[in-house]
Image: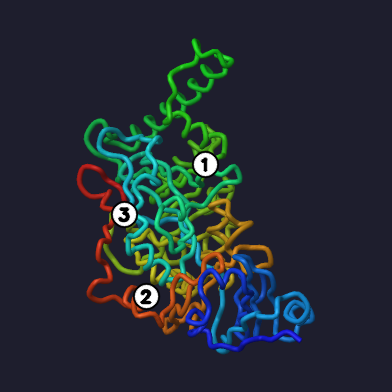
Amino acid sequence: MIRLRLVPALFCAALVSESFAQEVPHAFVGATIETCAGAAIADGVLVVHRGKIVGIGAVGDDQVVRLLTGVMPEETVSVDVRGKTLMPGLVCSHSHIGSVSGGDSSGPIQPEVRALDSINPRDPGIQKAQAGGITTVNVMPGSGHLLSGQTIYMKLRDVGTVEELAVRNADGSIAGGIKMANGTNPQKRTPFPGTRGKAAALVRMQFHRARDYRRRVEAAAGDPAKLPDRSLAMEALLDAMDGKRMVHHHTHRQDDILTVLRLQREFGFRVVLHHVSEGWMVADEIAAAGAPCSVIVIDSPGGKLEAARLSLETGAILDRAGVLVGFHTDDGITDSRLFLRSAAISVRAGMDRDKALQAVTIANARMLDMQDRVGTLEVGKDADFVLLSGDPLSVYTRVLQTWVDGRKVFDLEDPKDRLLASGGYGASSDQSMSMCCYGQQGGGQ
Protein backbone atom coordinates (compact mmCIF):
# COMPACT_ATOMS: atom_id res chain seq x y z
CA MET A 1 0.00 0.00 0.00
CA ILE A 2 1.33 3.43 -0.96
CA ARG A 3 1.90 5.84 1.91
CA LEU A 4 0.72 9.39 1.29
CA ARG A 5 2.19 11.82 3.79
CA LEU A 6 -0.52 14.41 4.37
CA VAL A 7 1.12 17.77 4.95
CA PRO A 8 -0.35 21.28 4.75
CA ALA A 9 0.61 23.19 1.62
CA LEU A 10 2.24 26.02 3.53
CA PHE A 11 4.66 23.69 5.33
CA CYS A 12 5.58 21.41 2.45
CA ALA A 13 8.85 23.16 1.58
CA ALA A 14 10.06 22.94 5.16
CA LEU A 15 9.83 19.14 5.02
CA VAL A 16 11.25 18.53 1.57
CA SER A 17 14.46 19.98 0.12
CA GLU A 18 14.46 21.38 -3.42
CA SER A 19 16.53 18.53 -4.86
CA PHE A 20 14.46 15.94 -3.00
CA ALA A 21 11.27 17.57 -4.29
CA GLN A 22 12.37 16.76 -7.82
CA GLU A 23 12.79 13.07 -7.02
CA VAL A 24 9.71 12.67 -4.84
CA PRO A 25 6.28 13.04 -6.52
CA HIS A 26 3.97 15.64 -5.02
CA ALA A 27 0.21 15.31 -5.15
CA PHE A 28 -1.71 18.54 -4.51
CA VAL A 29 -5.09 17.35 -3.31
CA GLY A 30 -8.47 19.01 -2.91
CA ALA A 31 -8.15 22.34 -4.72
CA THR A 32 -10.33 23.73 -7.45
CA ILE A 33 -8.12 23.36 -10.53
CA GLU A 34 -8.39 25.89 -13.34
CA THR A 35 -6.63 23.94 -16.09
CA CYS A 36 -7.07 26.67 -18.77
CA ALA A 37 -7.46 23.73 -21.16
CA GLY A 38 -11.11 22.95 -20.40
CA ALA A 39 -13.58 22.96 -17.55
CA ALA A 40 -12.39 23.59 -14.02
CA ILE A 41 -11.99 20.53 -11.79
CA ALA A 42 -13.67 20.73 -8.40
CA ASP A 43 -11.91 18.80 -5.62
CA GLY A 44 -9.00 18.13 -7.93
CA VAL A 45 -5.62 16.42 -7.74
CA LEU A 46 -2.45 17.65 -9.47
CA VAL A 47 0.56 15.31 -9.42
CA VAL A 48 4.02 16.59 -10.35
CA HIS A 49 7.30 14.72 -10.58
CA ARG A 50 10.78 15.68 -11.81
CA GLY A 51 9.60 19.01 -13.16
CA LYS A 52 6.62 17.70 -15.13
CA ILE A 53 2.90 17.22 -14.62
CA VAL A 54 2.31 13.47 -14.45
CA GLY A 55 -1.34 13.38 -13.40
CA ILE A 56 -4.41 15.59 -13.08
CA GLY A 57 -8.04 14.85 -12.31
CA ALA A 58 -10.67 14.80 -9.60
CA VAL A 59 -10.33 13.04 -6.28
CA GLY A 60 -11.77 9.57 -6.84
CA ASP A 61 -11.18 9.49 -10.61
CA ASP A 62 -9.99 6.04 -11.63
CA GLN A 63 -7.02 7.49 -13.47
CA VAL A 64 -5.84 9.47 -10.46
CA VAL A 65 -6.43 6.56 -8.07
CA ARG A 66 -4.33 4.30 -10.31
CA LEU A 67 -1.62 6.92 -10.48
CA LEU A 68 -1.45 7.35 -6.73
CA THR A 69 -1.72 3.67 -5.86
CA GLY A 70 0.01 1.88 -8.70
CA VAL A 71 2.62 4.10 -10.29
CA MET A 72 3.92 6.62 -7.78
CA PRO A 73 6.79 5.70 -5.47
CA GLU A 74 6.01 4.85 -1.89
CA GLU A 75 7.08 8.21 -0.50
CA THR A 76 4.72 10.38 -2.55
CA VAL A 77 3.97 13.60 -0.67
CA SER A 78 0.30 14.56 -0.61
CA VAL A 79 -0.22 18.27 -0.03
CA ASP A 80 -3.58 19.34 1.38
CA VAL A 81 -4.82 22.34 -0.65
CA ARG A 82 -8.53 22.07 0.08
CA GLY A 83 -10.34 25.39 -0.28
CA LYS A 84 -7.59 26.78 -2.51
CA THR A 85 -7.30 27.22 -6.30
CA LEU A 86 -4.59 25.85 -8.57
CA MET A 87 -3.99 27.26 -12.03
CA PRO A 88 -1.16 27.28 -14.58
CA GLY A 89 1.78 29.56 -13.98
CA LEU A 90 1.00 32.94 -15.51
CA VAL A 91 2.72 33.91 -18.75
CA CYS A 92 3.47 37.60 -19.37
CA SER A 93 4.07 38.33 -23.05
CA HIS A 94 5.55 41.81 -22.48
CA SER A 95 7.70 42.88 -19.55
CA HIS A 96 10.78 44.93 -18.72
CA ILE A 97 11.86 43.27 -15.47
CA GLY A 98 15.50 42.42 -14.88
CA SER A 99 16.83 45.96 -15.41
CA VAL A 100 16.72 45.29 -19.14
CA SER A 101 18.05 47.83 -21.64
CA GLY A 102 18.41 47.68 -25.40
CA GLY A 103 19.50 50.00 -28.18
CA ASP A 104 21.15 53.34 -27.51
CA SER A 105 20.75 56.72 -29.18
CA SER A 106 23.11 55.92 -32.07
CA GLY A 107 20.32 54.77 -34.38
CA PRO A 108 16.63 53.86 -34.58
CA ILE A 109 17.04 50.24 -35.76
CA GLN A 110 19.38 47.97 -33.80
CA PRO A 111 18.47 44.29 -34.34
CA GLU A 112 21.90 43.08 -33.25
CA VAL A 113 21.30 44.21 -29.64
CA ARG A 114 20.24 41.43 -27.24
CA ALA A 115 18.20 41.80 -24.07
CA LEU A 116 20.15 38.73 -22.93
CA ASP A 117 23.25 40.87 -22.43
CA SER A 118 21.56 43.37 -20.11
CA ILE A 119 19.47 41.21 -17.75
CA ASN A 120 20.28 41.34 -14.05
CA PRO A 121 19.13 37.91 -12.76
CA ARG A 122 19.09 39.24 -9.19
CA ASP A 123 16.81 42.19 -9.93
CA PRO A 124 13.96 42.15 -7.34
CA GLY A 125 11.49 42.70 -10.19
CA ILE A 126 11.96 39.03 -11.06
CA GLN A 127 10.99 37.95 -7.54
CA LYS A 128 8.05 40.36 -7.55
CA ALA A 129 6.82 38.72 -10.73
CA GLN A 130 7.03 35.35 -8.97
CA ALA A 131 4.94 36.90 -6.18
CA GLY A 132 2.29 37.69 -8.79
CA GLY A 133 2.20 34.08 -10.00
CA ILE A 134 4.19 34.76 -13.18
CA THR A 135 6.40 31.85 -14.21
CA THR A 136 7.24 32.63 -17.86
CA VAL A 137 7.94 36.06 -19.31
CA ASN A 138 9.00 37.80 -22.51
CA VAL A 139 11.51 40.45 -21.43
CA MET A 140 11.94 43.18 -24.02
CA PRO A 141 13.97 46.33 -24.55
CA GLY A 142 11.88 49.47 -24.64
CA SER A 143 10.02 51.03 -27.54
CA GLY A 144 11.96 54.24 -28.01
CA HIS A 145 13.35 52.73 -31.21
CA LEU A 146 11.77 51.40 -34.37
CA LEU A 147 13.64 48.22 -33.46
CA SER A 148 15.35 48.12 -30.08
CA GLY A 149 16.74 44.60 -30.12
CA GLN A 150 16.13 40.93 -29.49
CA THR A 151 13.83 39.90 -26.64
CA ILE A 152 14.42 36.95 -24.32
CA TYR A 153 11.91 34.38 -23.09
CA MET A 154 12.62 33.41 -19.49
CA LYS A 155 11.39 30.93 -16.89
CA LEU A 156 11.44 32.67 -13.51
CA ARG A 157 13.54 30.08 -11.72
CA ASP A 158 15.55 30.83 -8.58
CA VAL A 159 18.97 30.83 -10.22
CA GLY A 160 22.03 33.03 -10.49
CA THR A 161 22.61 33.61 -14.20
CA VAL A 162 20.55 34.76 -17.15
CA GLU A 163 21.53 31.60 -19.02
CA GLU A 164 19.72 29.57 -16.34
CA LEU A 165 16.65 31.80 -16.65
CA ALA A 166 16.58 31.55 -20.43
CA VAL A 167 14.17 29.34 -22.32
CA ARG A 168 15.97 27.20 -24.89
CA ASN A 169 14.93 26.30 -28.41
CA ALA A 170 15.15 22.70 -29.60
CA ASP A 171 18.66 23.36 -30.96
CA GLY A 172 19.84 24.75 -27.61
CA SER A 173 19.81 28.40 -28.66
CA ILE A 174 18.21 31.00 -26.42
CA ALA A 175 14.57 31.69 -27.32
CA GLY A 176 13.26 35.18 -27.98
CA GLY A 177 11.71 37.52 -30.48
CA ILE A 178 12.35 40.97 -31.96
CA LYS A 179 11.03 44.16 -30.36
CA MET A 180 9.70 46.82 -32.75
CA ALA A 181 7.62 49.96 -32.24
CA ASN A 182 5.85 52.73 -34.08
CA GLY A 183 3.80 55.77 -33.11
CA THR A 184 5.24 58.61 -31.05
CA ASN A 185 7.81 56.70 -28.97
CA PRO A 186 10.49 56.40 -31.72
CA GLN A 187 9.90 59.93 -33.04
CA LYS A 188 12.90 62.06 -32.09
CA ARG A 189 15.56 64.13 -33.77
CA THR A 190 17.76 62.64 -36.51
CA PRO A 191 18.82 59.86 -36.98
CA PHE A 192 15.46 58.85 -35.51
CA PRO A 193 12.32 59.52 -37.59
CA GLY A 194 10.32 62.68 -37.13
CA THR A 195 7.09 61.45 -38.70
CA ARG A 196 5.07 58.25 -39.03
CA GLY A 197 5.77 58.12 -42.76
CA LYS A 198 9.53 58.34 -42.24
CA ALA A 199 9.34 55.67 -39.52
CA ALA A 200 7.73 53.16 -41.90
CA ALA A 201 10.19 54.09 -44.65
CA LEU A 202 13.21 53.40 -42.42
CA VAL A 203 11.82 49.99 -41.43
CA ARG A 204 11.07 49.11 -45.04
CA MET A 205 14.57 50.10 -46.15
CA GLN A 206 16.16 47.95 -43.46
CA PHE A 207 14.18 44.84 -44.38
CA HIS A 208 15.14 45.35 -48.03
CA ARG A 209 18.80 45.55 -46.97
CA ALA A 210 18.34 42.21 -45.21
CA ARG A 211 16.94 40.70 -48.41
CA ASP A 212 19.93 42.02 -50.36
CA TYR A 213 22.28 40.57 -47.73
CA ARG A 214 20.64 37.15 -48.16
CA ARG A 215 21.04 37.32 -51.94
CA ARG A 216 24.74 38.14 -51.61
CA VAL A 217 25.30 35.29 -49.15
CA GLU A 218 23.48 32.84 -51.43
CA ALA A 219 25.35 34.08 -54.52
CA ALA A 220 28.68 33.49 -52.75
CA ALA A 221 27.82 29.78 -52.51
CA GLY A 222 30.14 29.35 -49.54
CA ASP A 223 33.16 30.99 -51.18
CA PRO A 224 34.85 33.05 -48.40
CA ALA A 225 36.27 35.45 -50.96
CA LYS A 226 32.78 36.35 -52.18
CA LEU A 227 30.89 36.35 -48.89
CA PRO A 228 29.88 39.78 -47.54
CA ASP A 229 31.15 40.80 -44.14
CA ARG A 230 29.03 39.11 -41.50
CA SER A 231 26.19 41.29 -40.22
CA LEU A 232 24.55 40.34 -36.92
CA ALA A 233 21.86 42.92 -37.61
CA MET A 234 20.95 41.44 -41.00
CA GLU A 235 20.97 37.90 -39.58
CA ALA A 236 18.47 38.91 -36.90
CA LEU A 237 16.16 40.52 -39.47
CA LEU A 238 16.34 37.42 -41.67
CA ASP A 239 15.42 35.29 -38.64
CA ALA A 240 12.32 37.46 -38.31
CA MET A 241 11.40 37.21 -41.99
CA ASP A 242 11.97 33.44 -41.87
CA GLY A 243 9.61 33.11 -38.91
CA LYS A 244 12.32 31.98 -36.51
CA ARG A 245 11.78 35.05 -34.31
CA MET A 246 8.38 36.52 -33.54
CA VAL A 247 8.14 40.27 -34.06
CA HIS A 248 6.64 41.79 -30.91
CA HIS A 249 5.37 45.17 -32.08
CA HIS A 250 4.42 48.10 -29.82
CA THR A 251 1.55 49.97 -31.48
CA HIS A 252 -1.38 52.04 -30.17
CA ARG A 253 -3.35 54.01 -32.75
CA GLN A 254 -5.56 52.28 -35.29
CA ASP A 255 -3.58 53.74 -38.21
CA ASP A 256 -0.30 52.58 -36.65
CA ILE A 257 -1.75 49.10 -36.20
CA LEU A 258 -2.65 48.96 -39.88
CA THR A 259 0.86 50.14 -40.81
CA VAL A 260 2.31 47.16 -38.92
CA LEU A 261 -0.02 44.79 -40.78
CA ARG A 262 0.96 46.41 -44.08
CA LEU A 263 4.66 45.80 -43.38
CA GLN A 264 3.90 42.27 -42.21
CA ARG A 265 2.23 41.45 -45.53
CA GLU A 266 5.17 42.92 -47.45
CA PHE A 267 7.95 41.11 -45.61
CA GLY A 268 6.22 38.01 -44.26
CA PHE A 269 7.31 38.17 -40.64
CA ARG A 270 5.11 36.76 -37.87
CA VAL A 271 3.83 39.44 -35.56
CA VAL A 272 2.16 39.95 -32.19
CA LEU A 273 0.57 43.37 -31.81
CA HIS A 274 1.25 44.83 -28.36
CA HIS A 275 -0.84 47.36 -26.41
CA VAL A 276 -3.35 48.05 -29.28
CA SER A 277 -5.11 50.87 -27.42
CA GLU A 278 -7.32 51.43 -30.48
CA GLY A 279 -7.39 47.80 -31.53
CA TRP A 280 -11.13 47.70 -30.89
CA MET A 281 -11.53 50.10 -33.85
CA VAL A 282 -9.85 47.71 -36.34
CA ALA A 283 -10.71 44.34 -34.82
CA ASP A 284 -11.88 42.84 -38.13
CA GLU A 285 -8.69 43.87 -39.92
CA ILE A 286 -6.55 42.36 -37.15
CA ALA A 287 -8.56 39.14 -37.27
CA ALA A 288 -8.25 38.93 -41.06
CA ALA A 289 -4.47 39.25 -40.75
CA GLY A 290 -4.35 36.45 -38.15
CA ALA A 291 -2.32 38.65 -35.82
CA PRO A 292 -2.48 37.88 -32.08
CA CYS A 293 -2.83 40.83 -29.71
CA SER A 294 -1.10 41.30 -26.38
CA VAL A 295 -3.32 43.88 -24.70
CA ILE A 296 -2.42 46.19 -21.84
CA VAL A 297 -5.24 46.78 -19.36
CA ILE A 298 -4.96 50.16 -17.63
CA ASP A 299 -7.90 51.50 -15.65
CA SER A 300 -6.47 54.84 -14.56
CA PRO A 301 -6.25 58.09 -16.56
CA GLY A 302 -3.02 59.54 -17.85
CA GLY A 303 -0.31 58.14 -20.06
CA LYS A 304 0.13 59.23 -23.64
CA LEU A 305 -2.18 60.95 -26.07
CA GLU A 306 -2.16 58.08 -28.57
CA ALA A 307 -3.56 55.82 -25.82
CA ALA A 308 -6.43 58.22 -25.04
CA ARG A 309 -9.01 55.95 -26.68
CA LEU A 310 -7.90 52.84 -24.84
CA SER A 311 -10.95 50.76 -23.90
CA LEU A 312 -11.35 48.17 -21.19
CA GLU A 313 -13.57 46.30 -23.65
CA THR A 314 -10.71 45.77 -26.12
CA GLY A 315 -10.06 42.18 -25.02
CA ALA A 316 -13.71 41.23 -25.37
CA ILE A 317 -14.10 42.96 -28.75
CA LEU A 318 -10.98 41.38 -30.21
CA ASP A 319 -11.91 37.95 -28.85
CA ARG A 320 -15.38 38.12 -30.40
CA ALA A 321 -13.75 39.06 -33.73
CA GLY A 322 -11.68 35.88 -33.61
CA VAL A 323 -8.34 37.34 -32.50
CA LEU A 324 -6.04 35.43 -30.14
CA VAL A 325 -5.95 37.75 -27.10
CA GLY A 326 -3.41 37.86 -24.31
CA PHE A 327 -2.70 40.42 -21.60
CA HIS A 328 0.61 41.77 -20.38
CA THR A 329 2.04 43.83 -17.55
CA ASP A 330 4.59 46.00 -19.36
CA ASP A 331 6.16 46.00 -15.89
CA GLY A 332 6.86 48.62 -14.54
CA ILE A 333 3.92 50.31 -16.35
CA THR A 334 1.67 47.91 -14.44
CA ASP A 335 2.87 45.77 -11.55
CA SER A 336 3.57 42.07 -12.13
CA ARG A 337 2.16 41.33 -8.68
CA LEU A 338 -1.28 42.43 -9.94
CA PHE A 339 -1.31 40.59 -13.28
CA LEU A 340 -4.48 38.60 -12.55
CA ARG A 341 -6.26 41.93 -12.18
CA SER A 342 -6.03 42.42 -15.97
CA ALA A 343 -8.16 39.32 -16.49
CA ALA A 344 -10.64 40.37 -13.81
CA ILE A 345 -11.10 43.88 -15.23
CA SER A 346 -11.63 42.45 -18.72
CA VAL A 347 -14.29 40.04 -17.50
CA ARG A 348 -16.04 42.96 -15.85
CA ALA A 349 -15.88 44.72 -19.24
CA GLY A 350 -17.57 41.81 -21.00
CA MET A 351 -14.89 39.23 -21.80
CA ASP A 352 -15.64 35.54 -21.33
CA ARG A 353 -14.18 34.27 -18.05
CA ASP A 354 -12.36 31.29 -19.54
CA LYS A 355 -10.90 33.41 -22.33
CA ALA A 356 -9.70 35.98 -19.80
CA LEU A 357 -7.90 33.28 -17.77
CA GLN A 358 -6.40 31.93 -20.99
CA ALA A 359 -5.25 35.47 -21.82
CA VAL A 360 -2.77 35.33 -18.92
CA THR A 361 -1.74 31.72 -19.57
CA ILE A 362 -2.05 29.67 -22.77
CA ALA A 363 -2.80 32.55 -25.17
CA ASN A 364 0.46 34.23 -24.20
CA ALA A 365 2.28 30.90 -24.36
CA ARG A 366 1.18 30.60 -27.99
CA MET A 367 2.55 34.08 -28.71
CA LEU A 368 5.93 32.86 -27.43
CA ASP A 369 5.75 29.50 -29.28
CA MET A 370 5.73 27.79 -25.88
CA GLN A 371 2.24 26.28 -25.94
CA ASP A 372 3.62 22.72 -25.84
CA ARG A 373 5.41 23.41 -22.56
CA VAL A 374 3.42 25.91 -20.49
CA GLY A 375 0.09 27.71 -20.26
CA THR A 376 -2.22 24.86 -19.23
CA LEU A 377 -2.25 22.16 -16.58
CA GLU A 378 -1.98 18.99 -18.67
CA VAL A 379 0.01 15.78 -18.37
CA GLY A 380 3.44 16.13 -19.93
CA LYS A 381 3.75 19.89 -19.55
CA ASP A 382 6.21 21.69 -17.29
CA ALA A 383 5.18 21.73 -13.63
CA ASP A 384 4.60 25.49 -13.57
CA PHE A 385 1.61 26.38 -11.42
CA VAL A 386 0.22 28.85 -8.91
CA LEU A 387 -1.59 28.17 -5.64
CA LEU A 388 -4.18 30.86 -4.89
CA SER A 389 -6.20 31.56 -1.77
CA GLY A 390 -9.44 31.79 -3.78
CA ASP A 391 -10.98 32.65 -7.14
CA PRO A 392 -8.35 34.01 -9.58
CA LEU A 393 -10.57 36.99 -10.42
CA SER A 394 -11.35 38.08 -6.86
CA VAL A 395 -9.72 41.21 -5.51
CA TYR A 396 -9.36 39.41 -2.17
CA THR A 397 -7.35 36.48 -3.58
CA ARG A 398 -3.63 36.23 -2.79
CA VAL A 399 -0.92 34.24 -4.50
CA LEU A 400 0.15 31.74 -1.85
CA GLN A 401 2.81 29.82 -3.76
CA THR A 402 4.41 29.84 -7.21
CA TRP A 403 6.14 26.77 -8.65
CA VAL A 404 8.42 26.58 -11.70
CA ASP A 405 9.59 23.25 -13.12
CA GLY A 406 8.31 21.53 -9.98
CA ARG A 407 10.27 23.80 -7.63
CA LYS A 408 8.73 26.35 -5.30
CA VAL A 409 10.03 29.85 -6.11
CA PHE A 410 7.59 31.90 -4.01
CA ASP A 411 5.88 31.22 -0.69
CA LEU A 412 3.80 33.91 1.02
CA GLU A 413 4.65 32.33 4.38
CA ASP A 414 8.34 33.07 3.84
CA PRO A 415 9.06 36.54 5.34
CA LYS A 416 11.40 37.46 2.49
CA ASP A 417 8.80 36.54 -0.11
CA ARG A 418 6.03 38.28 1.81
CA LEU A 419 8.07 41.50 1.78
CA LEU A 420 8.33 41.33 -2.01
CA ALA A 421 4.63 40.52 -2.34
CA SER A 422 3.34 43.21 0.01
CA GLY A 423 6.02 45.90 -0.20
CA GLY A 424 7.97 47.67 2.48
CA TYR A 425 11.47 48.83 3.28
CA GLY A 426 14.02 46.92 1.19
CA ALA A 427 11.52 45.33 -1.19
CA SER A 428 12.89 47.22 -4.20
CA SER A 429 16.58 47.29 -3.33
CA ASP A 430 18.71 47.17 -6.51
CA GLN A 431 15.64 47.21 -8.75
CA SER A 432 15.77 49.58 -11.72
CA MET A 433 12.92 50.39 -14.07
CA SER A 434 13.40 50.54 -17.81
CA MET A 435 13.27 54.27 -18.58
CA CYS A 436 13.63 53.95 -22.32
CA CYS A 437 10.66 56.12 -23.32
CA TYR A 438 11.77 59.28 -21.55
CA GLY A 439 14.28 61.68 -23.00
CA GLN A 440 16.55 60.95 -25.95
CA GLN A 441 16.26 57.17 -26.05
CA GLY A 442 12.47 56.72 -26.05
CA GLY A 443 10.49 53.49 -25.35
CA GLY A 444 7.91 52.23 -22.81
CA GLN A 445 4.13 51.91 -22.91
Please name the residue that numbered disc 2 is placed on. 417
Report the residue marked by disc 3.
99
- In three-dimensional space, the C-alpha distance between marks 3 and 1, rounded to whole angstroms, equals 22 Å
Between 363 and 153, the one nearer to me in the picture: 153
Q: Quadrant of residue 63?
A: bottom right
Helix, strand or loop under label 2: helix
**Can you tell which of label 1 and label 2 is closer to the viewer?**
2
Quarter of the rendering occupied by the C terminus: bottom left
Q: Residues within 10 Å of mark 2 (few under 14, many from 20)?
A: many
Question: Which residue does the numbered mark 1 point to in the structure image?
Answer: 245
| Amino acid bearing label 2 | Asp
Camera-side residue: 338 or 63? 63
Q: What kind of element bears circle 1? A: loop
Question: In which quadrant will I find the N terminus?
Answer: bottom right
**Sequence-wise, which precedes: disc 3 or disc 2?**
3
Badge 1 or badge 2: first in the primary sequence:
1
Q: Is residue 192 visible?
A: yes
- What residue is at 46 percent from the left and 58 percent from the top? 137
Q: Secondary structure at mark 3?
A: loop
Mark 1 surroundings: few (<14), some (14-19) or many (≥20) residues within 10 A: many
